[in-house]
Image (spheres, rainbow, N blue to C red):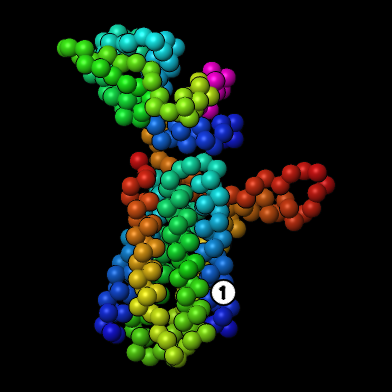
Amino acid sequence: MHDVGVFLLGGLAMGDLIAGLFFLRYWIVTQDRFFLYFAAAFAIQMVCRMLLIGTTANSESEPLVYVFRLLSYGVILAGIFDKNRAKIAKALSGPP
Amino acid sequence: MDSIIPPDIRRFVLDRIDSIAELEALLLLRNSPDTWWEDAAAAQRLYLGAEQGRAVLIRLEAAELLISQDDAPGRRWRYRPQSGDLREMVDRLAYYYTKHLVPVSNLVHDKSKSRIKEFSRAFEFPETQDP
Amino acid sequence: MGMMIYGLCALTSFLCAWLLLQAYARTAYKLLLWTGMFFVVSTVNNLLLMIDKIVFPVTIDLSIPRYLIALLALGVLFRGLIFEEE
């Protein structure tokens, strides 16, 4: 059962890599920085899954590994924030 | 600009119209709904070669907007949307095409360009309204 | 601590799903549907992660189902990225 988990994680890591490469390509094509955030998010996810392969035997360190997952989603949030920087600044400074 | 065309019209165009040529062909046949158009005549009116004209008409038939009959050596075509809903969609589309040419043209043209920018745009927060 | 991490992950993927599916409702671009669905399935995955690690940490191990769901999410994403873009 452990092997099945490792196998699936390997497949998922591969999938994350491919998705990341898609978004990298979109960034190159569109020059829109937003896609770079997603590419990074998937790259971090891939690292996360690879680390999980190493820790499936030792579940003590698993929560630490999931910090990577948090980082991945954090990068996505950063991208959304970056995209809407001007609007957020305007909203925060209040109506005239 | 994006919101001028209603979502159901957008969906109709995205599903069934692949090019400006198809749109023009559809409206051409719609203008004389009781006329059977021969391949060659339609293609000529649309400033298309015979092959291209035929391809456009075939796609419109596949989109359930035209019907055709054998008319050796070619085929002849007629405006016939397969449902009342489709007919209404085309009527409304014709209206928007005449009143808002640029947005409708852009909608059709954008189909052949990369759609991926829409992914990026989806994450833009709406403009805050000034009170 | 774990709950915060997993909860934030679930919230973020939910936000992404929400934004993308709203945009799909507005524009009817299928790419937005598939990428939105990727985040929907990812949200489910994150919720299952919470259940797996916090609610039933010892009694049940949901890792295999979670990984399969994550694969499903990627499948949906690839469906969108490969087939819906010119």
Q: Report the side of C72 relative to A88 (left or right).
A: left
Residue C68 drawn in magenta = no
Depth check, front residue: A82 or B27: B27
Q: Residue B110's image quarter?
A: top left
In percent of width and height, residue B124 lies at 59, 49
Most prominent secondary structure in the magenta stretch? helix
Residue appearing at x 48%, y 42% in the figure: C28
Say if A48 sits above or below B102 in the image: below
Secondary structure of residue under mark 1: helix
Residue appearing at x 35%, y 13% in the figure: B46
Residue appearing at x 26%, y 82% in the figure: A3
Say if B23 sits above or below C53 in the image: above
Depth check, front residue: A67 or B126: B126
Q: Amino acid at mark 1?
A: Gly
Q: Residue B100's image quarter?
A: top right
Residue A24 visible? The answer is: no
Chain containing mark 1: C
Characterize the local packing of mark 1: few (<14), some (14-19) or many (20 or more) Cα atoms within 10 angstroms: some
Q: Where does the magenta region start and end?
A: B95-104
In percent of width and height, residue B48 lies at 30, 15
User: Among all residues in the image, which is located at the extreme left?
Assistant: B73
User: Among all residues in the image, which is located at the extreme right?
Assistant: A96
In percent of width and height, residue C7 lies at 56, 74
Residue annotated with mark 1 = C7
Residue A87 visible? The answer is: yes
Q: Report the side of A5 relative to C39 (left or right).
A: left
Say if B22 sits above or below C57 in the image: above
Q: Report the side of C53 relative to A11 (left or right).
A: right
Depth check, front residue: B104 or B85: B85
Residue appearing at x 35%, y 30% in the figure: B63
